[in-house]
Image: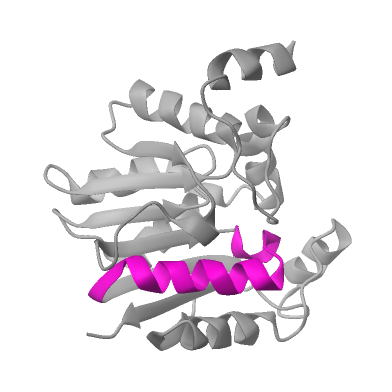
Amino acid sequence: MHQKTAQRHTHDETAPETAGATIRWWAPAYDAVAWLTSFGQEKAIRKQALRVAALKPGEKVLDVGSGTGTLGVAAWRKVRPDGEVTGIDASPEMVELARRKAKGKGSGATFQVAPIEALPFGDASLDVVLSTFMLHHLPDDVKVMGLAEIARVLKPGGRFVAVDLAGEGRSVLTTFMTVIGHRMPKDYTQQLMSGMTEAGLADVTEVKTTFGYLAFLTANKEG
């Protein structure tokens, strides 16, 4: 039943070639799974990410790995009426769900199928790039390409905000995440920060929050 539905809504868009993990058949359950694995804190985490991003009206924003569109829809409220929010995901099923969510909430956020390693945007064309809970799904080589693409599309002075799992041992909840299959190296946060610097981003910083099992990272595009 689900497979037929997915095919009906995504027949004109195919998943791009990517070595990164792509959520396909269980996309309709993603929001429920996200709520459970965030211990019911998904909404609070999203609000914290937007506080860190400090979006302004009129800004052009990209949400990389936008999933079912929850963050993109919320981000659009911060940049309207003249700003733009686009979400990209390698899963046609997730993009379809995001489009439905945006339409149902009257949001101007748009979503399209694309991989992080080939962003469909011009050089220096965006003010802000957001990424939540997707970088740890990428193989190292794809992560390198993806971060380079993020640096490419940001305007001089543009901002990158990434939220991802923190390194193993940071908190009790980090240990729990390891138990359910998200085993991260102890220095994973430092690896991400080094990767951002190597991609050409500057002022890479971890913003301390109450979510000890997560890393909220910010960086700027020099210009």
Displayed quadrant of residue 155: bottom left
Displayed quadrant of residue 92: top right
In the current view of this chain or complex, which residue is farthest to the right?
179
Above-or-below relation of 77 to 139: above
Q: Which residues are magenta?
A: 134-156
**Magenta span includes 200:** no
Instruction: Between residue 1 and residue 147, name the one nearer to us.
Output: 147
**In this picture, residue 181 sits left or right of residue 54:** right
Task: Identify which residue is drawn at 19% across, 57% down.
Answer: 59
Q: Can residue 176 be spotted in the picture?
A: yes
Q: How is the image coloured?
A: one colour
The picture places residue 41, in percent across and down from the top left corner, at 57, 52
Above-or-below relation of 60 to 168: above
**Magenta span includes 139:** yes
User: In which quadrant will I find the N terminus?
Assistant: top right
- Count the labels in the image: 0
**In this picture, residue 199 sits left or right of residue 90:** left
**In this picture, residue 139 sits left or right of residue 98:** right
